[in-house]
Image (cartoon, rainbow, N blue to C red):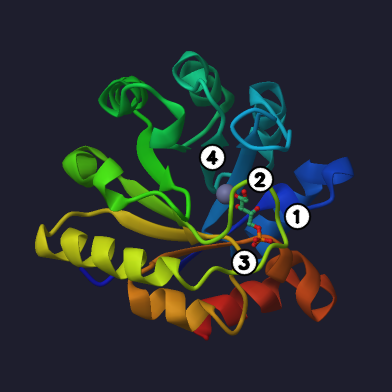
Amino acid sequence: MTSSIKISPSILSADFSKLGEEITSLDKAGADYIHVDVMDGHFVPNLTIGPEVIKKLRPFTKKVFDVHLMISPVDQYIEAYSKAGADIITFHPEATEDTSKTINLIKKLKKKVGISLKPESSIDLIKDHLSKIDLILIMSVEPGFGGQKFMPKVLDKLKNIAKIVSEKKLNIDIEIDGGINFENCRLAKEAGANVLVSGSTIFKENKGDLKKNIGILRSN
Ligand code: DX5
Ligand code: ZN
């Protein structure tokens, strides 16, 4: 399955005092998805935004809200993020007792299902669920903060999962998230990622020229 590369800028690196405007700027700069990092200070040692904020951000773009839930427990919050306007709801199997149950909760709400794996987590956690999901998020940093260094060791895992997805002819986005920059984005694509998340590279490089930075990640 040849998919064109999609860019999903992470608003974790945006100016939180004007998130609505920042999202509209990302939309105009050519973002395919908007990556919204939700953190609860429990599953990860950081706290960001909840469903009420996402609801307020929804009108600022029609682009896909690619919502990355770094929260545990997760099941009781799925409906709130769905109602807030999430299009893809991605959770961590490490954060729930029953991965199938969480997948079904998201599907019942007619949202796309993503599963995210921390760098140390094995693809064994998701292998039995591939036919039911729409996106796999391979973390290339420890979840919790933007601006961390890319961990190249996850590229083997990315290659393995991309091979399985291709062999089974599944229509699944393979997204990589964490420390993606102009140098390593080519490695991520060659390993099989078709969606690149980036926060600090997009917001900080080239004096924050969003359009230029999104373009470089897409074409490098
Ligand atoms: C980290 C988040 C990532 C992060 C990416 O827990 O899931 O999405 O914001 O930011 P950069 O691209 O700066 O690593
Ligand atoms: Zn993320």
Q: Is residue 59 visible?
A: yes
Mark 2 or mark 4, which is nearer the start of the sequence?
4
Amino acid of disc 2: Gly
Residue 25 % position (x, y) = 74, 57
Q: How far apart, in angstroms, are the residues tagged by discs 4 and 3?
A: 18 Å
Checking the image for residue 67, the label placed there is 4
Residue denoted by label 3: 179
Q: Residue at x 21, y 46 (%)?
A: 127
Labels 3 and 2 touching (C-beta < 8 A) = no
Labels 4 and 3 touching (C-beta < 8 A) = no
Residue denoted by label 2: 144
The local crowd at label 1, few if under 14, some if 14 to 19, many if 20 or more residues have their Cα within 10 Å, is: some
On the rendered image, what quadrant is the N terminus found in? Answer: bottom left
The reply to whether the residue tagged 2 has its Cβ within 8 angstroms of ligand 1 is yes
Q: Please tell me whether mark 2 sits on a helix, a strand or a loop.
A: loop
Amino acid of disc 3: Gly
Please state which of residues 82 and 43 is positioned toward the viewer in this rendering.
43
The local crowd at label 2, few if under 14, some if 14 to 19, many if 20 or more residues have their Cα within 10 Å, is: many
Mark 3 or mark 1, which is nearer the start of the sequence?
1
Task: Determine whether 127 is above or below 96 in the image.
Answer: below
Residue denoted by label 1: 13
Q: Is residue 156 left or right of residue 77?
A: left
